[in-house]
Image (cartoon, rainbow, N blue to C red):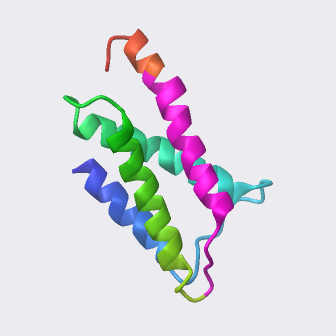
Amino acid sequence: MLLGLALVVTTWVSLSPQPPALPGVPLADKWAHLLTYVVLAFLVDASWPDHPFGRSKWAWLLGYGLLIELIQSQTPNRMFSLADLLANAAGILIYAGGVLRGLRAFGIR
């Protein structure tokens, strides 16, 4: 349920012709992508706990990000961004390499 809500909100924010205002932090957009995909990776992983965080979950998340970028290329005031895809991948990598290991260390995953 949380994953579904997160996907609806992420899709809506990503495809809205008027992007929400971000703080005046350098690369705020890329930080937003990275943090969003850390959270999405956690939610995808938690939604299917019997399956390891492997290729299928990575592929699903990266495919979703690519689909959003392709649709953005057809949305007013939006554009396709390879840098956004890289930030998405970095968020997934941070989840897999850091957050997931931390959860396992505490016996959560």
Q: Is residue 28 left or right of residue 5?
A: right
Q: Is residue 2 left or right of residue 9?
A: left
Along the line of sight, the residue nearer the viewer: 4 or 51: 51
Q: Is residue 59 magenta?
A: no
Q: Is residue 37 left or right of residue 109?
A: right
In the rendered image, the residue lying farthest to the right is: 26
Task: Identify the residue shown where x is 58% and y is 54%.
Answer: 33
Task: Identify the residue shown where x is 37% and y is 39%.
Answer: 55
Q: Is residue 23 left or right of residue 108?
A: right
Residue 32 visible, this angle: no
Along the line of sight, the residue nearer the viewer: 66 or 16: 66
Q: Residue 9 location, x and y as percent?
A: 39, 64
- Above or below, 80 against 104 in this view is below
- Above or below, 9 against 62 in this view is below
Main secondary structure type of the part rendered in magenta: helix
- Above or below, 75 against 31 in this view is below
The magenta-colored residue range is 77-100
Q: Residue 54 location, x and y as percent?
A: 36, 34
- Above or below, 100 against 87 in this view is above
In the rendered image, the residue lying farthest to the front is: 55
Task: Identify the residue shown where x is 55% and y is 51%.
Answer: 88
Query: Which image quarter is the C terminus in?
Result: top left
Q: How many marks?
A: 0
Q: Residue 8 location, x and y as percent?
A: 34, 65
Residue 23 visible, this angle: yes
Task: Identify the residue shown where x is 53% and y is 70%.
Answer: 69
Along the line of sight, the residue nearer the viewer: 88 or 3: 88
Q: Residue 35 location, x and y as percent?
A: 55, 46
Find residue 94 and report its image quarter. top right
